[in-house]
Image (cartoon, rainbow, N blue to C red):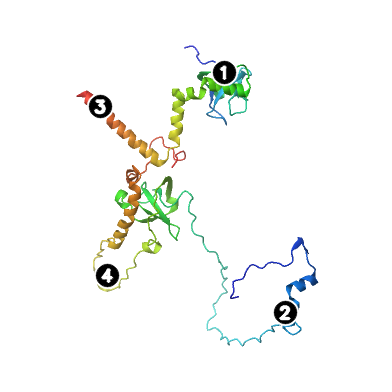
Amino acid sequence: MAKSEKPRVSRNKELIRGVGRFSRSKMYHKRGIWALKEKNGGSFPRHDKQPPQAKAVEKAPKFYPADDEPKPLINKRKPKPTKLRSSITPGTVLILLAGRFKGKRVVFLKQLESGLLLVTGPFKLNGVPIRRVNQAYVIATSTKIDISTVDASKFTDKYFEKEVVRKKKTESDFFEAEKEDKKTLPTEKKEDQKVLDAVVLQAVESVPDLNQYLSSRFSLRSGMKPHELVF
Amino acid sequence: MPFRRYVEIGRVALVNYGPDYGKLVVIVDVVDQNRALVDAPKMVRSQMNFKRLSLTDIKIDIPRVPKKKVLTEAMEAAEVQKRWENSSWGRKLIVQKRRAELNDFERFKVMLAKIKRGALIKREISKLKK
């Protein structure tokens, strides 16, 4: 149907389960079957089945596999996007728990389509660049920064994809010592970092001691019980 | 070392075990060698074993098993809550509670404050040493 269908309502109100307000004859009249018949010259409009169109002749396949292999069952399941913990909102300070930045306190920007969290140090304060991080390796603190003015729309999962370098396999390359060029960050990425951090830093400066807080690492001291700590 | 805090009618005690943990209650009657009838303004009057109570220095003047209204008025008149919060024991408990509910950023700020305080003290000491 080209037109958008409104949800169909019944013209026959249900009094009790199985019993309608109107009888069969009344419903016939209400539905207007008599009007359709009148329009169609006495009988209800019919659409006869169309003669079956001749199917294209299928050739016998050239190759039959030796054994009948069982077909895998159809799976139409679509994985849902990772549910973001309710304690993590844009501007929350997170503590990273794994990787080279473990213990660093970091600002959360947004959740990407893959489910990973987009975070930034800011780079000037703790050396954490704009980075993706898994929710499972993060503690969300209750400290929130106002980053409503930050525009993180250009950062998607595609931004972080590795660049595929295609090398032609020639004999000379084989015998040459592997010269690995030091992979430096392209300047646009460095610029992106600076632009994003400028706005974030403004928000950070407005709260006293927050810049020192973000520069320091989290660690457990003697007597601190993680299950009793309030983050 | 004589006993100073006696179990008596009107003795204010702190509950140290059970669902009413941490509440201040008043002993309004003694049931037997082990148990007391205990009451507080926002609590149903009930019996408690002495082992669940830690006696405090505060005592108020009440008749045996007073009505709730009488008890509340006597506690207001003796300023039990204020005396408790000013006592060193009471203050310690308040500080402990506050420390337990600090969040990560607040703990960091406390650390900075402690460092500053220590630096000031050291500066004064070094001045005195000269």
Residue A96 visible in the picture: no
Q: Which mark is residue A174?
A: 4
Q: Which mark is residue A36?
A: 2
Q: Badge 2: how crowded within 10 Å, few (<14), some, or many (20+)?
A: some
Residue B113 visible in the picture: yes
Position of the N terminus of chain A by quadrant: bottom right
- Nearest to the observer: residue A181 or residue B15: B15
* Kind of residue at disc 4: Phe
Position of the C terminus of chain A by quadrant: top left
| Relative image position of residue B55 (x, y in whole percent) | 52, 20
Q: Are marks 4 and 3 in contact (CB under 8 Å)?
A: no
**Cα distance between the residues tagged 3 and 1:** 48 Å
Camera-side mark, 4 or 3? 3
Camera-side mark, 2 or 1? 2
* Kind of residue at disc 2: Leu
Dot 1: chain letter? B
**Cα distance between the residues tagged 4 and 1:** 94 Å
Camera-side mark, 4 or 1? 1
**Cα distance between the residues tagged 3 and 2:** 104 Å
Residue at 23% x, 68% y: name it: A176
* Kind of residue at disc 3: Glu
The answer to which of marks 4 and 2 sits earlier in the sequence is 2
**Residue corresponding to mark 3:** B124
Secondary structure beneath label 3: helix
Residue lying furthest top: B2
Depicted A55 relative to depicted B90: above or below = below
**Residue corresponding to mark 1:** B10
Q: Are marks 4 and 2 in contact (CB under 8 Å)?
A: no
Secondary structure beneath label 1: loop
